[in-house]
């Protein structure tokens, strides 16, 4: 009987000791936010989330942030980096110290452009003047709506993403519109 009481007493002392142990190095989480709080991406794209955690004490260690997704078929998440898998909607959740934050994720299918044309293939313009090149991307539901522009010779003109050209100095430059793997060019001569 004494042996049984002794074992029971040791077990009770161990439980009390464990429950009274606190790891004072860890802060209590008051709130957790993730950014972005919603995102729309194409299949295969990655998003890195930023967490903002408020705690009861500064400089303390934070409990680990646990990431999860409601649908791994739509998006995967690992250590705050999400990879879009296939079209659909899911919610990403970050949890730490009993607090959670979520991000809605809309994954879309990327529709490649099949054609890129420009309304002009040659432009003559005077220094200081402005003009524009109109780009037409098909199909109309292509994911890319505006081209990326490259210039063969920097400093002669500027061109914005909408094709607006400003002539800076005399010279000739080729402006190349690029969408997906398609290219279209226009030669601009500044007088």
Image (cartoon, rainbow, N blue to C red):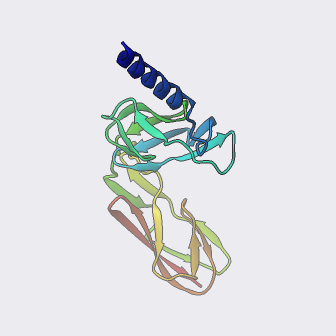
> How many badges with numbers are in the image?
0
Q: Work out which quarter of the rendered image holds the C terminus and state it.
A: bottom right
Q: Position of residue 135 (x, y in %)?
A: 46, 58
Furthest residue to the front?
A: 2
Tell me the residue at 34%/44% (across/down): 43
59 relative to 173 in the view: left or right:
right
Image position of 128 with respect to 8: above or below = below
Q: Is residue 178 visible?
A: yes
Instruction: Please state which of residues 83 and 181 is positioned toward the viewer in this rendering.
Output: 83
Establish if 13 lies above or below 158.
above
Q: Nearer the viewer, residue 62 or 43?
A: 62
**Image quarter of residue 162:** bottom right
| Residue in view at x 39 percent, y 29 percent | 70
| Residue 175 point in image, percent of width and height | 47, 73
Instruction: Name which residue lies at 32% across and 61% down.
Output: 181
Note whether 156 is above or below 1 in the view shown. Answer: below
* Quadrant, the N terminus: top left
Asked if residue 140 shows in the view, the reply is no
- Above or below, 45 against 183 in this view is above
Query: Which residue occupies the extreme top position in the image?
Result: 1
Q: Quadrant of residue 185?
A: bottom left
The spot of residue 149 in percent (x, y) is 47, 67
Horizontal and vertical percent for residue 10?
A: 44, 25
Q: Residue at x 31, y 52 (%)?
A: 114
């Amino acid at each position: 009987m004494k042996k049984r009481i002794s074992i029971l007493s040791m077990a009770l002392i161990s439980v009390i000791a464990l429950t009274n142990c606190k790891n004072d190095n860890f802060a209590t989480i008051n709130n957790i936010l993730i950014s972005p709080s919603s995102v729309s991406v194409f299949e295969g794209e990655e998003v890195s989330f930023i967490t903002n955690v408020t705690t009861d004490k500064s400089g303390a260690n934070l409990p680990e942030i646990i990431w999860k997704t409601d649908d791994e078929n739509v998006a995967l998440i690992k250590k705050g980096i999400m990879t879009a898998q296939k079209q659909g909607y899911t919610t990403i959740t970050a949890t730490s110290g009993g607090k959670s934050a979520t991000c809605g994720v809309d994954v879309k299918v990327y529709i490649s452009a099949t054609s890129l044309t420009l309304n002009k293939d040659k432009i003559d313009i005077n220094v200081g003047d402005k003009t524009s090149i109109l780009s037409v991307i098909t199909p109309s539901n292509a994911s890319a709506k505006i081209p990326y522009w490259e210039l063969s010779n920097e400093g002669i003109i500027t061109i914005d993403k909408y094709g607006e050209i400003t002539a800076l100095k005399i010279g000739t430059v080729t402006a190349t519109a690029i969408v997906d793997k398609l290219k279209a060019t226009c030669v601009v001569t500044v007088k």
